[in-house]
Image (cartoon, rainbow, N blue to C red):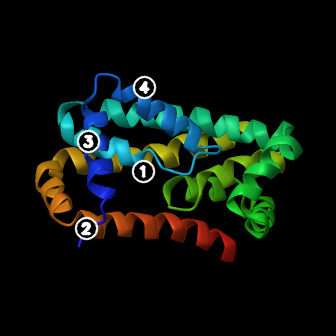
Amino acid sequence: MELPFIRPLYEWTLRLAAHPKAKLWMAGISFAESSFFPIPPDVILAPMAVARPEGWWRAALICTIASALGGVAGYLIGWGLYEAVAIPIINAYDLHEANERFRELYLEYGWVVVAIAGFTPIPYKLATIASGAVGMAIIPFILASVLSRGARFFMVAFVAARFGPPVLSMIEKRLTFFTILFLVLLVGGFALVRFI
């Protein structure tokens, strides 16, 4: 069984990944996802690496830089605009308890929490905003962001470029399953934060 909206969305993503301005789209999504946008940039990065396997590392680098810059924006929101901007974002995702728990973890573990959130399905935006809110030193924050986001995006792009066509064929045959799996991981990341 295939959900009716999945196939058009998937085909749109593949067209976008092969579009001449795909890198700009991906950079914008990477930047926004680090502070407020819910969809991770992997959804464009992976098909882009499949569409242009020779440039997988460029796509991963752009994704990493844009995400780290977006992370700085999230940090600044937490640092200087907590009441005006951060609270509405936390309210939108209903992450009040998770935000408080993250703040406690930051005070105990610092940059390690940023690195974990940057690589895993845990919402990175929560880590960036919380880092600014607790006044984490900016240099360790940036280094942890660049290293963890870079590791994630370079891994995704490399795997997609290296194994892309067979994997893409498998995904196309089981599109509904992989869409549900992606959504479960995304929602699971948010849920995990609530229970940390």
Counting from the top left corner in percent of width and height, residue 16 is at: 31, 34
Instruction: Identify residue for label 2.
Output: 2
Q: In terms of sequence position, does the residue under pointer 2 or pointer 3 come before the other? A: 2
The residue at the far bottom in this view is 195
Q: Nearer the viewer, residue 173 or 125?
A: 173
Write down the quadrant of residue 6 in the picture.
bottom left
The label number, if any, that marks residue 152 in the structure image = 1
Considering only order in the chain, which callout, 2 or 1, is on the residue closer to the N terminus?
2
Q: Nearer the viewer, mark 4 or mark 3?
A: 3
Question: Label 4, on which residue?
Answer: 24
Left or right of 4? Residue 63 is right
Label 3 Cα neighbours within 10 Å, binned few <14 / some 14-19 / many ≥20: some
Q: CA distance from mark 4 to mark 1?
A: 19 Å
Residue occupying the point 59% across, 66% down? 190
- In the picture provided, is 87 more to the left or to the right than 146? right
Q: Which mark is residue 14?
A: 3
